[in-house]
């Protein structure tokens, strides 16, 4: 009987804090891992293009002011950072990923249609080359409702 008196002072329900933590889906995990792989390969290819091109430091610095080179360096970094945040179920990651993916897509259409005035089969290849990035945006957007946080804190907001 003495043991029961010891447990009567402790209310087990009050002692246990039960908070339901949202769980990352396997699908979101696969998307994030594929994004990290794509971002890493893209950055390696950009680096290789500089090294294999045997460009001088001055020429490389001049090219870094070019919008396309900056975009090829910035877009994978934004996508990778966004994937890290989405891995932690942070909705801000989707916004970063969206910017990192849409910027090259919009820029490629701007160059293809505005600057180079590409029509016909070449325009079809421009469209085809942007199907995968747009597809990933749609796939990530399907996972946004499962993400519960906007910031790094524990405050949760309803809706997107």
Image (cartoon, helix red, strand yellow):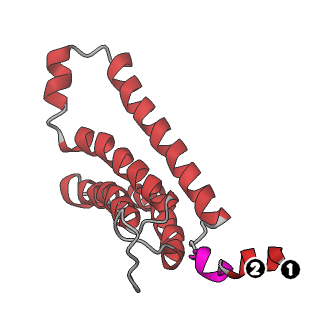
Residue labelled with disc 1: 1
Label for residue 5?
2
Task: Decide: is 149 above or below 71.
Answer: below
Query: Residue placed at 38% from the left, 46% from the top?
Result: 76
Q: Identify which residue, 97 or 12, lies in the foreground.
A: 12
Q: Residues within 10 Å of mark 1 (few under 14, many from 20)?
A: few
Query: Residue placed at 43% from the left, 65% from the top?
Result: 90
Q: What range of the chain is rendered magenta?
A: 11-19
Q: Residues within 10 Å of mark 2 (few under 14, many from 20)?
A: few
Whole-Å distance between the Cαs marked 2 and 1? 7 Å
SS class of the residue under badge 2? helix
Q: Quadrant of residue 134?
A: bottom left
Direction from residue 37 to residue 7 in the image, left or right: right
Q: Quadrant of the N terminus?
A: bottom right
How far across and how far down the image is residue 46, in percent?
37, 32
How far across and how far down the image is residue 57, in percent?
19, 15
SS class of the residue under badge 1? loop
Direction from residue 72 to residue 110 in the image, left or right: left
Task: Decide: is 92 above or below 36.
Answer: below
Q: Quadrant of the C terminus?
A: bottom left
């Amino acid at each position: 009987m003495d043991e029961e008196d010891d447990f009567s002072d402790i209310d087990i329900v009050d002692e246990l804090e039960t908070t339901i933590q949202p769980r990352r889906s396997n699908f979101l995990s696969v998307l994030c891992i594929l994004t990290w792989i794509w971002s890493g390969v893209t950055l390696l290819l950009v680096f290789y293009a500089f090294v294999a091109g045997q460009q001088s430091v001055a020429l490389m610095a001049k090219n870094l002011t070019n919008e396309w080179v900056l975009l090829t360096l910035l877009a994978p970094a934004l996508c990778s950072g966004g994937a890290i945040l989405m891995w932690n179920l942070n909705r801000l990651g989707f916004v970063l990923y969206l910017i990192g993916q849409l910027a090259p897509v919009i820029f490629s259409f701007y160059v293809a249609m505005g600057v180079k005035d590409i029509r016909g089969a070449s325009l079809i290849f421009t469209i085809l080359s942007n199907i995968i990035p747009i597809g990933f945006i749609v796939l990530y957007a399907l996972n946004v409702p499962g993400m519960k946080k906007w910031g790094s804190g524990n405050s949760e907001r309803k809706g997107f």
